[in-house]
Image (cartoon, rainbow, N blue to C red):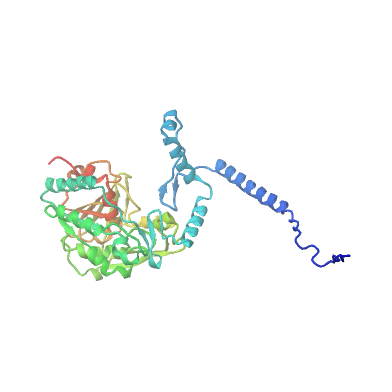
Amino acid sequence: MKRRRKVGKIGRGRGRLKKRKPPNTLLHITVMRVFFVFFFLLIVANVLSSNRETSARENRVLAQGPEFSLVSVASGTYMSQFEKFLSDQFVGRDFFRGLSVDFKRIGGSRMENDVFLGRNNQLMQDIVSPNQDELQVNIEAIRSFAKRYPNINHSMMLVPDAATVLSDRLPSFAVVSDQTRQMNHVGRELEDYLAWIDVMIPLRNYADEGVFFQTDHHWTSLGAFIAFQEAAGTLGIAGDFNSAFMAFPVTNTFNGTLASRSGFAQNVREDIYVYVPRGDDELIVNFVDEQRRSTSLFDSSKLETYDQYGVFLGGNTSVISIRTTAPDNRRLLIVKDSFANSFVQFLTPYFREIILVDPRYYQGHIDEIMSTYRITDSLILYSGNTFFQDNNLSGVLGGEE
């Protein structure tokens, strides 16, 4: 008779499936409720909030609600404009945008909205490639202007952008267009019509001295001063320039448009310096279209805004006339972008009158300016990126020969 094995307690429970603990439904429900409440409050906040026309932080006009029409809906333009409107007017946009940039930076991103985050937290705008047809139209317009006024001393300065001058600070593996080649092409095309002022080498020689802002695309007053010394001979100016001006800081809280545009370097604060002639330099600044006057090149009220670079001439406008007490009776026309706003501070001791025309805002023709003011000299002064994207210059300068 076979013995039966006793089944003991050894191994009891082994091999049995353990019962799963029920999910923490209370926690899940709480998280969902919080999410829906937050989402609902966000919708309510966006509905109740008033639309902003401009962003002081980004220094640009914000998209507004598009006008509804069947045609715009059918073409798809309505939804495209509506998406831009929602993006620009979204409550908490600056906070969420900053959060997004921080996550991208942690992930290794070194570019946002065409702005590079370079070495030493140097921000640099990407270099644009010009439309060759539009560029040729602008070159022809400049030629036409120079030919119409052969007795005027014509000169031109294109300021290389920071990504060209400070190319050694670009992020690893970053590739930008060859702006030096682009500028040399323009110089060759115009060499028979005006004096070309090349400031590339002087700016590179002082690149480590702070010739560009860290958080803005403009050059600093030092950069403009170095370019002025290079341009002085061409403009018929002589003297000991280092002793002719005094530099003063007007703010140490500047955070520029590249920081606003990219979300990088939000906590960086920079100095803005202005240069003042050591001698008597009384002047009257006439903002022609605004019909107002000032006795200073500098607008201190701009230091209370995000656009602190606007301290130079109060920002951009169509036509400005600056009358001085300079002994020389010459009158200089400057066709320009915003880089000239901080350059003109070095010219007032040497010209009796300076007329600044910004083609982006001026609705007239340059011949009207020439007939109104007794111009003896002209200077076209642009940053490289602005010039190679310009579609206003030819309308202002062009004309029949």
Image quadrant containing the N terminus: bottom right
Residue at (35% x, 61% y) in the render: 174
Viewer-proximal residue among 158 and 277: 158
Is 100 left, or right, of 228 in this rendering? right
Residue 364 horizontal side relative to residue 214, left or right: left
**Residue 21 position in % (x across, y down):** 74, 56
- What is the total number of numbered labels drawn onto the structure image? 0
- Whether residue 279 is visible to the viewer of this picture, yes or no, is no
Looking at the image, residue 175 lies above or below residue 363: below
Query: Where is residue 40, by image quadrant?
Result: top right
Judge from the rendering whether residue 80 lies leftward or rightward of residue 10; answer left or right.
left
Q: Nearer the viewer, residue 22 or 338?
A: 22
State the quadrant of the C terminus.
Answer: top left
Residue nearest the viewer, comparing 139 with 273: 139
Position of residue 236 measured from the top left corner of the image (x, y, whole percent): 15, 61
**In-image side of 47 versus 343 (left or right):** right
